[in-house]
Structures are given as C-alpha cells and as structure tokens.
Image: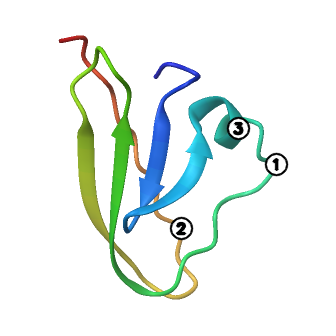
Amino acid sequence: MPADASIYLDGRFLGTGEELARLHSSLLVDAGSHRLQVVRPGYESVEKEFVAVAGEVVELKLKLDEE
C-alpha cells in the first residue's frame, strides 16, 4: 500500500498508510459492523466491511491496484 494512501474507518479519516504503519499497537474499535476504506489517486479504492467482536482481534489485509 502506498505510504500516502488515506485510510478511513466508518467514513472518518484515520490517517495515512505511513502513519498507521508506525503504530505500536492495534486500533481499538467498538464491537459491531465497520467499514474500512483505503483511497489514493491513481489507484482503485478498496473497501472492506468487517464485524468486530469484543475481546477479539480482527486482522485485515488490503491491496491497492493501480488504475
């Protein structure tokens, strides 16, 4: 994923790929359904819906393809 890709959770900006890659821990989200979106000009946007369960870890892998 490009370092300058923008990442959104439920429509709210989380940061860039580079910023999130530097995190030393996981992101904490409320239990329930969520939508993760990755956007960058020149690439096809990727969107993934997932369900978070309290106390469990969800690992998502997304790949951006060039347009």
Residue drawn at 44 percent across, 54 percent down = 8
How far apart marks 2 and 3 lie (CA) works out to: 20 Å
- Discs 2/3, front: 3
* SS label for mark 3: helix
User: Of 53 and 39, which appears nearest the observer?
Assistant: 39
Furthest-front residue in this view: 41
Task: Residue at 61%, 46% (x, y): give it.
Answer: 15
Q: Secondary structure at mark 1?
A: loop
Confirm or deny contact between disc 3 and disc 1 (CB under 8 A). Answer: no
Quadrant the C terminus occupies: top left
Amino acid carrying label 2: it is Val
Side of 34 relative to 18 (left or right): left
Q: Amino acid at mark 1?
A: His
Where in the figure is residue 40, as x and y percent of width and height?
Answer: 38, 27
Kindly identify the amino acid type of the residue bearing the numbered disc 3: Glu
In the depicted structure, whether residue 38 falls above or below residue 8: above
Residue 36 shown left or right of residue 19 in the figure: left
**Which residue in the protein does label 3 denote?**
19
User: Which circle, 2 or 1, is nearer the viewer?
Assistant: 1
Counting labels gives 3
Residue where numbered disc 2 is placed:
57
Sequence-wise, the earlier of marks 3 and 1 is 3
State the separation of the CA atoms marked 2 and 1: 15 Å
| Rendered residue at 34%/49% (across/down) | 37
Q: In the rendered image, which quarter is residue 17 located in? A: top right
Q: In the drawing, what numbered circle is on residue 24? A: 1
Looking at the image, tell me whether mark 2 or mark 3 is earlier in sequence order.
3
Dot 2 falls on a residue whose secondary structure is: loop
Neighbourhood count class around disc 3 (C-alpha, 10 Å): few under 14, some 14–19, many 20 upward: some
Q: Disc 2 or 1, which lies upstream in sequence?
A: 1
Q: Crowding at label 1, few (<14), some or many (≥20) Cα neighbours within 10 Å? A: few
